[in-house]
Amino acid sequence: MVAKGFDYASIGFYTFDCLGWPFTAVPPGGGCYFIDELTMAVSGAAGTAAIAAAKMGLKTLAVGGVGEDLMGTWVLERLKQFHVDTAMMQHQADWKTSSSIVTTRADGSRPALHMKGATGTFVVEPKHFADVANAKVVHLGGVGLMDAMDGAPNAALMKYVKEQGCITTVDVFAGSKDDLADVDAVLPYTDYFMPSIEEARALSGLHDLADCTKFFHDRGVTCCVFTLGEDGAFYSHAEGTHFKIPAFDITVKCTCGCGDAFDAGYAVAICKGLDPETSVRFAQATSALNASGLGSQAGVESFEHTWNFMKNTPIKR
């Protein structure tokens, strides 16, 4: 295999998040309720993964779009603070940065208000495909939300990077079968398909884990790795290997970005050459650490920290 300049290229959904904890209710009228914590984070299926992977030692390339606004400026600066390469982050004056107001409850659930923004407008032109393919692992995060890239453009990009020997991972922003066409476009070029079980069920219209994985294997996916929330994760390879691993027993603070952190952990495991079961456990550890803090990647510190957490934290029984 030709040596790559990056370990990880994370393409797609980058968003600015403002998060408050703990949220209890909307004040009546123009009233005010006090909360204990307020923070900002780069989030999204590509943004969370990019920073979490960089924290754990991967040389990471960010590929997406932001506006030339206060949120976009902060997103770019925050990525750079973690040594994420932002050369392929597009920014234009007439774009708005994808942004969210996240109200996190004490149980970790997080109702949010979201402005779609530049995630729906940026485009990776074919002349830049080679730049994206200069990574060992290429992650497409936010399929179904990338209006200008979803469908044929994403399919062309993923086909190209596969032909260049990249390992591909895909995560989605999908709520129903209406999103299936955009997801279908990239599945033949997907090594690891990594949605939540809720998204997998919404896309397939099926409930059983085995039925869901067969549905996506039949569409060209080599390996399905579904996150199951408090029930852990499920791995299924097209050759027949499959297993389920329970979640870690932790106190959850915020679930924002947990699935995206899982994607990053799995990419780190790929780059480290870990076996499938250890890879899933490491990805789960990354997700669990994410859940321990307020805002995406807040609890993720380093590869060593995540590895030690994986080795020493009990699982749910």
Image: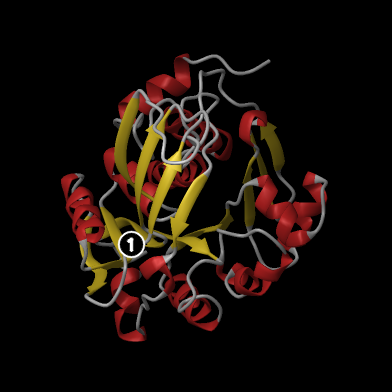
How far from the left and from the top, in percent, is residue 4?
A: 29, 62
Crowdedness near tag 1: few (<14), some (14–19) or many (≥20) residues, C-alpha within 10 Å: many
How far from the left and from the top, in percent, is residue 26?
A: 50, 37
Q: Is residue 18 above or below residue 1?
A: above
Closer to the camera in the image, 107 or 214:
107
How far from the left and from the top, in percent, is residue 40?
A: 29, 41
Q: Quadrant of the N terminus?
A: bottom left
List the residue tagged with mark 1: 135
Splitting the image into 4 quarters, where does residue 99 fall?
bottom left
Query: Does residue 239 show up?
Result: no
**Amino acid found under the numbered disc labelled 1:** Ala
Residue positioned 31% across, 43% down in the render: 41
SS category of the residue bearing label 1: strand
Q: Is residue 102 above or below residue 307?
A: below
78 relative to 255 in the view: left or right: left
112 relative to 302 in the view: left or right: right
Q: Quadrant of the C terminus?
A: top right
Residue positioned 30% across, 85% down in the render: 127
Residue positioned 26% across, 68% down in the render: 67
Closer to the camera in the image, 147 or 152:
147
Closer to the camera in the image, 44 or 141:
44
Q: Is residue 233 above or below residue 223?
A: above
Residue positioned 77% across, 53% down in the render: 212
Q: Is residue 164 above or below residue 217?
A: below
